[in-house]
Each structure stands twice: as structure tokens, then as C-alpha cells.
Image: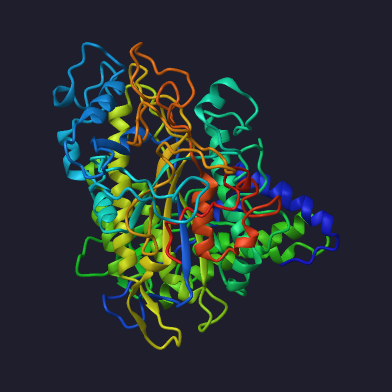
Amino acid sequence: MVDFKNFQERRNFLRAATTMAVAGGLPTLDTLVNVANAAAPIGDPGTTDVGNEYKAIVCVFFYGGQDHANILIPYQDGNSAGNGTAATNAEYDRYALDRSNKSSSRPAGDAQNENVNPTGNLSYKRTTLAATALAATTSNVLTGNANPNAGGWTTNTYGRRFALNPQMPEMASLFAAGKVAIMANVGPMLAPINRQEWYTSNTKPRPLNLYSHDDQQSGWMSGTSGLATPSVGIGGRIAAHSAIDSLNTGAKVSTQVSLSGSNTFMLADVSAPQGAIAYQMGTGRVGRLTNPTTCDTGSTNTSLPYCIQGGPIRIVNGYSGNAGMAGAFSSRITATPENVSVYHDQWRQIMRQSINTEQAISAAFLASPTNEEIIAPFVAVDQLNGSTNSLAQQLRMVAAMIRASNQLGASSTQPVKRQIFFVGIGGFDTHGNDFWDNNPKLNRMISQALNAFWTALGNIKVRDPAGTGFLSGVSARDRVTTFTMSEFGRTLDSNGDGSDHGWGNFQLVMGGAVREGKIFGQSHNVASVSGSPVYMELDALAGAVPRIGLPPPSNSGTVRIANKLNHSLNRGELLPTMASDAMIATIAQWFGVPTASMTGSTGVFPTLAGVHGTNWNVGFMKP
């Protein structure tokens, strides 16, 4: 680290440099990508493990606004007794009608034309949902951590059943196994707000420029949805916290690693430690290892182990294709005088840090190879359905980096203990007749990529505290928590072709530390509690049966603007009852951020207390 003679100079430069990085104007953070080479036969001792204290969080962002109404879909009604008897399909029929642009001539139930979009029908047939239908929750007792509303955070579905998107059978299976939880009605918030306040009052603060892609992406990623240009992201604040940064002292790679370019989530404060500055990587290319240092991406010899090769500047470990460029960089770095200007000094630091990181990762991939068990699950899904699964490619490199963490610490006995990863996939802005072209394909990619990641993590062992063996029955699945984000949900109804911008959404959290599969969040109607914030008042039309994501029926054909209705706005957009910060803060606490550092103006989540007070832990993570 360059020791700047003037601290304010350094702050000013870093502020400018960080701004350029977010805007894509700092190529050295984006193009000095790494990634090396690697593979060893299955079963090599010690080649597939992480340290005993290791934890990672992986943020998966869906750019464009994932369509919430086809993520968690009503499948079967329940009743106030919660026993599922006398079940009907009334809620499914209402979902199907609302998704069809409320066409009075549209057939009900299974007679609809699925995946045919000339009339803007966005619903799935109920028979199609059978394979991904989730089990009913029949307990009438809410569980989880204390919440301002009665009982806790876990949704009681009163015997009702929901289905995940039919393109997500792997996620449905992991939900049934208790490894995936669903966050309902979640989105950026500054204060609790109910339907009446939304339509009749301006007293409750709202996120800046709701329904705007850029602003809501920033709101999700920064935890400051009231700011137009946030200077720090949630990942940046987590990585810079002393409780996290101190665990990676002397590490050879930044705590934060992005596989999806510059992003606000990983934006670090100008005074943050070097380890909090995000490092951007490429996904590399899969090949076959033809000798100990050569990864042949053209080889089809299946008898050879897989390897990953990539990075525009190959400097070490036998890669000499860009030796001239590497030499030029090194010469320029060496030739630049120390005190010419703060910009020269910082340029030197960034260049050297990038090259050193590339070298360290290359060496780590050779010293502790990424083996078949890590790469093969992703190869199996990468080119399915005639499309490249870019999310699978990004998560493949995340798995490889997790695997390499035992070589990227300060020494052989000090592996990296904390890592934050960011990956993303776009194409969700489906206003037009591209809905059925994009949405099913993207959801299939998501489910397959996340499942491949889950499989790969299961093949990574965890060292015991002494570092001499492995923990029985424990894998990296238990030490890695993956969660999804998207700037907003969309409208339940159709605009005639696709769906439009909304607010709240459903998100997935996957990991071995996740509590048994449940739907979390106050996504139902609850009575107010004296002295506590009122999230949603009781919906008289729903009675004792809670509703998720569906407006109440209306004789006029439109949803009424009135008090005591549930958490949908006029076009079926979700009105959030869980702040996105609460979801991420629950994960951050598991990751090691102290409770005392969560809220407040200088906390990791500055606006969280304004929504949920001290009752922000949603309870979906095991202690």
C-alpha cells in the first residue's frame, strides 16, 4: 500500500477512482483479470477443502426486474383451521385471471393457452405447476425471531400450497430438503407503509424513484434507497468492518470478488482497507489438462481432467503469451517515480495489486487444483437448451475461488476466512412479447446454475480446527450462503404483452446454514400490535386466510383503493413488508458482523432501524 503524504489527497483520489470504477472507467480493475489453470484427479488428498473458520456469501443479481408473480404461485387454497381440507383452486384461478389482462373471454383453469402470448397471458397452467408444488404449512403458529407483528417472521400459510416456477424443479427439491428459504414481499424500504398510506399520504418516506431500474438497483445494493448516488455498497461496508477485515489479515486477494463487473454492492468507502476493494475476475474457459501446466481449451480428450484457463494477461506458471505486455507493465510501474503525483502513486498501487492478485490466484490454482468434482457439475448445465448459461460459468469460478481459499491467505496455516462474491444475469425486463422467450429460459438457467453450485460445494470439505483432518458430515455448503436480488418485482397483471415495473418481490436464500425450507416474511395480513409499527392491517376480505401477492377480488374489475386491504397495489405489484436490508442483515450477522454494528447512521444498514426497529433478524439463518 502506498503511503500517501497527504491523507486528503488519497481520499480525493480514491473517491474519483471508485466513481470511475463503478462507471466502468477504470480498466485496470476490470481487465487485469486472472484465472489460471487447474485440475487434479478426483480424490487427491487435501485438494478439496476450506479452512475451519471459512464463510462466504454470494449475491446473485437478476438485472431487469425478475417477474415475482411467476416465482411463487398459488397452487391450492387452505382454510382458517390450517388443515388443508375442503381445498379449492380459487386463488389459482384469480392468479390466472389477473395474469391474463383480466380478459372476460379467457377460459379459466387448465384451458388457458400457456406460453402463447398474443393476448398477454402470463400465467402457467395449474397442471404444469404440480411438479414444483411445495408442501403445505399446516401450523397456525408463526415461528422465528420476534417481530413487531404477532409471533414471528415465518409465514403461516394455513394449509395453502404454493408452487415455484415450473422451470425451477431443482430449487423446489432444495426447498423440500430445507436448504432453500423463500423471502416474501421483500424490497428496499425506508419506513413501514401500508396500502392506505401509499395512496392517500405522503408522510411515510419511500425509496427514491421507485420503479426506476438504476435507482432500485442502487437501493438493493447500497442499503440506502433514499440516496441518488450512494458512495458505499452493502458488500463494501461488510468487507471493511473490522470484525471481517481482521479475519483476512495478510490475504493475497481482496475479500470481495466480482464475476459480474462493477457494481454498487461492492463499492467500498474511500477510507476502507485495501482488502475491501473489490477484485473483478473473468469466468475463464473450461479445457482439459494436457500436462501439469497447460490447459487446452480445444481438447476433447475425456480421459484428461478438467481445467479452467483464462485471463487476458498471463504472467506466471508457464503462460507467456502476453509476456511482452506483462514486461511493459512491470517496466512502467518500476519507472514511475514515487512522488510525481498522487495519481501516479495510486496507479502504481492498483496495477501492482492487480498483477499480484493474478499471480497469487494462478499459483493457488496450481498448488491446490480445482478438480473434476468442482467443474463437472457446471459443465453438465452450461450449454443446455441451446444457450450458454453465463450464471453457471460465473458460479463455476466462485466455486473454484472458494476451493482456492486455502492457498490465498497470509500463509499456508492462515487460509482466507471470509469471502464475498457477486454474480449477475440480465434479461428480466419483459414488457413486451419477449416474456415467454426470456422468462422461462432465464429461470431454467437460474435453477440449474444454483443447483450445480450446490453440488460443487458439497464436494468441498471443511478442515477440522486442528487443520489435520476434515469435519465429518460438513462441506462448504454449510459455510456458504447464496441469496438472490433483483431491483424490483413486476405487475401481476399483463400490459397486453408482458409485465411492467413493480416494487416488492420474492427472493431465494440457499445454504446449509439456512433453516428448514419455509416462506419467510410478513407476506400475510396481520393485526396491529399495540406500541409497534403496523405493517399490514387485517384484510377483512381474506378473513383468517393470509394472501401472498394477490389483490382482493373486486366487482368493478379493478382493485379498490381503500384501507384494510392487503399488500398488493392496483396492478398487483407487491407492497413490501420486509426491507431488503433485513434479509441481507440476517445473513451478515451469520457472516460475523456484530449486532451492534448493524443499524444507525454509521452502521452497515443505515436505514434498517427505520423500518424494523431492533426486530430486523428474519430468523432464516441457523445460529
| Outermost residue to the right | 6
Q: Is residue 329 left or right of residue 547?
A: right
Q: How many marks?
A: 0
User: Residue 473 in the image: x percent, y percent?
Assistant: 30, 76
Q: Nearer the viewer, residue 374 or 485?
A: 485
| Colouring rule applied to residues | rainbow
User: Residue 532 in the image: x percent, y percent?
Assistant: 57, 43
Q: Nearer the viewer, residue 69 or 37?
A: 69
Q: Is residue 47 visible?
A: yes
Q: Is residue 414 left or right of residue 9?
A: left
Q: Residue at x 24, y 30 (%)?
A: 92
| Outermost residue to the front | 530
Q: Residue at x 44, y 26 (%)?
A: 565
Q: Nearer the viewer, residue 284 or 613?
A: 613
Location of residue 286 (image quadrant): bottom left
Q: Residue 181, relative to residue 371: is it above or below? A: above
Q: Residue 192, relative to residue 371: is it above or below? A: above
Q: Residue 121, relative to residue 81: is it above or below? A: above
Image quarter (top left, top right, bottom left or bottom right) of the N terminus:
bottom right
Q: Is residue 332 visible?
A: no
Q: Nearer the viewer, residue 342 or 583?
A: 583
Q: Residue at x 35, y 34 (%)?
A: 547
Q: Is residue 257 left or right of residue 130?
A: right
User: Residue 409 in the image: x percent, y percent?
Assistant: 54, 75
User: Residue 294 in the image: x percent, y percent?
Assistant: 36, 69
Location of residue 97 (image quadrant): top left
